[in-house]
Amino acid sequence: MTEFIWRARVYWEDTDGGGVVFYANYLKYMERARTEWLRSMGHAQSELSEKFGFVFAVAEVKLNYRRPARLDDELSISCVPVPEGRASIRFQQVIRRGDEVLVEGEVRVACVDAKTFRPRRLPDFIRIHDGK
C-alpha cells in the first residue's frame, strides 16, 4: 500500500496550558490526513455525500501515544489505507516530528449510506487494492 503524508503545524489552539498537544487533537490531525488522502485522489468529502450518496463513519480507533507534540512543532501525519472487507478501510496512521514517532494508530472507517447510515459497498473509485 502507498503511504500518503500530510504536514501540519501545532498551533496554540491545539495545545493545553503547558504547550503540549491535547490528546484528542491527534485524532483531528489523523482525520485531516485521511481527508487530504481522499482529496489527492480527486475527491472531496462533500462530493461523496452530495454526488454519490455515501459518507465515511469512524467505526474503530486504536492509538498508542509515545511522545508529546508541542507548540510550533512541524508534524507529518501518514496514512496507509488497508482494505478490509467490502464496506470498510483500515488506515494505519503515524504522527511524526522529523524521524521521531509521536503517535501510532489504526482507524477503521465504514462506508455508509448518507441518509440511512446503513453499510454500503465501497465504490470502485475508492476501493483500495491489496495486490491480490
Image (cartoon, rainbow, N blue to C red):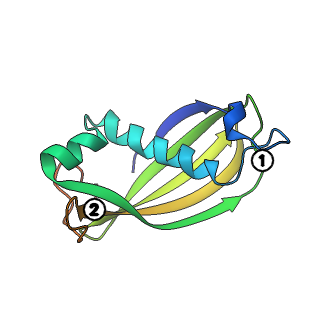
Q: Residue furthest right?
A: 18
Q: Left or right: where does residue 76 sit relative to residue 13?
A: left
The answer, for residue 3, to whether it is visible in the render is no
Locate residue 93, reporting x and y percent.
53, 52
Locate residue 89, reporting x and y percent.
35, 61
Mark 2 to mark 1 CA distance (whole Å): 32 Å
Q: Foreground: 118 or 75? A: 118
State which quarter of the image contains the C terminus: bottom left
Label 1 residue SS: loop
Q: Residues within 10 Å of mark 2 (few under 14, many from 20)?
A: many
Q: Residue at x 33, y 42 (%)?
A: 38
Amino acid type indicated by mark 1: Pro
Q: Residue at x 32, y 65 (%)?
A: 88
Label 2 residue SS: strand
* Residue 47 falls in image quadrant: top left
Which residue has dot 2 on it? 111
Q: Residue at x 77, y 44 (%)?
A: 16
Q: Left or right: where does residue 6 sit relative to residue 126?
A: right
Q: Foreground: 42 or 31? A: 31
Disc ID at residue 41:
none
Q: Residues within 10 Å of mark 1 (few under 14, many from 20)?
A: some
Locate residue 36, reporting x and y percent.
40, 37
Q: Find out whether the residues at labels 2 and 1 contact each other: C-beta distance under 8 Å.
A: no
Q: Earlier in the sequence, mark 2 or mark 1?
A: 1
Q: Residue at x 20, y 67 (%)?
A: 116
Which residue has dot 1 on it? 68
* Residue 69 falls in image quadrant: top right
> Eyeballing the image, is 72 above or below 112?
above
Number of marks in picture: 2
Amino acid type indicated by mark 2: Cys
Q: Left or right: where does residue 84 sit relative to residue 99?
A: left
